[in-house]
Image (cartoon, rainbow, N blue to C red):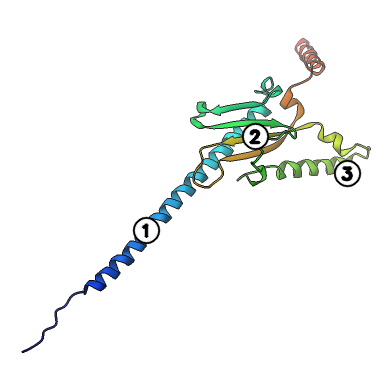
Amino acid sequence: MKVTRRSGFTLAEVMVTIMIVGIGLTMVVQALSVAKFKALQTYNVKAARDLGMLTLGRIRAGMYQEELDTRLTGSYAEEGFEYFDFEVRLGDEQFDESNDDDTESPFHDTWRAREEREEEAEREAGEDDSNEDPEEMDEDYEKVRIKVNFPKVGEYTNYVVLEEWIPWDQVYGLSEEEQAAAEAEAEEEEGR
């Protein structure tokens, strides 16, 4: 009698192969899920930053001068981001949530504005030998902070805080005396 060997896989070999393929597919699906969460978070952070910069631009343009006497809040539904909203704080006023540490926000834009102001102050101090106090120069600017909230994705933060130093008159408008002087100057210009 002749023993012939059959070609093929044993049951153990097939089970090991299926287990390896299953583990590999599970890892790929998890990686895709994490990648989708990170992509959505990146999109939300970028959109929130852009919307925050839009609002800061509107404040700089004087569009919210009447509303800035109180706490300014709003939504970005008109811009197509109905789940995004914002809060604006002036000066050293903090946001309502005491458990949020704004320095952990994905984007915090204070260093650039401070560096520019410091460089400008150094240039002016070098050109002008008057005894101006640097703190007095800061009074010409108001610290404007905006917190843009968006839907939470996984374990990531769901807000972005932007901070910018904006000239006082752009934030609050001209005082009555300055406005009267500007109107008088404009009338004088038209009279010429």
Type of the residue with mark 2 = Ile
Against 117, is 141 above or below?
A: above
Q: Do the residues labelled 3 and 1 touch (CB within 8 Å)?
A: no
Viewer-side residue, 127 vs 40? 40
Type of the residue with mark 3 = Gly
Name the residue furthest bottom: 1
Provide the secondary structure element on which disc 3 rests: helix
Viewer-side residue, 28 vs 162? 28
Res. 51 mark: none
In the picture provided, is 123 more to the left or to the right than 76? right
Residues packed near mark 3 inside 10 Å, few (<14), some (14 to 19) or many (20 plus): few
Res. 146 mark: 2
Residue 186 percent coordinates (x, y): 76, 15
The residue under label 3 is 126
Against 6, is 120 above or below?
A: above
In the picture provided, is 183 more to the left or to the right than 107? right
Q: Do the residues labelled 2 and 1 touch (CB within 8 Å)?
A: no
In the picture provided, is 78 more to the left or to the right than 87? left
- Marks 3 and 1 sit apart, C-alpha to C-alpha, by 65 Å
Which of the two labelled residues, at mark 3 and mark 1, occupies the earlier sequence position? 1
- Marks 2 and 1 sit apart, C-alpha to C-alpha, by 41 Å
Which of the two labelled residues, at mark 3 and mark 2, occupies the earlier sequence position? 3
Residues packed near mark 2 inside 10 Å, few (<14), some (14 to 19) or many (20 plus): many
Provide the secondary structure element on which disc 1 rests: helix
> Where, by quadrant of the figure, is residue 190 drawn?
top right
- Marks 3 and 2 sit apart, C-alpha to C-alpha, by 34 Å
Residue 133 percent coordinates (x, y): 90, 37
> Where, by quadrant of the figure, is residue 120 drawn?
top right
Front of the two marks 3 and 2: 2
Q: Quadrant of the C terminus?
A: top right
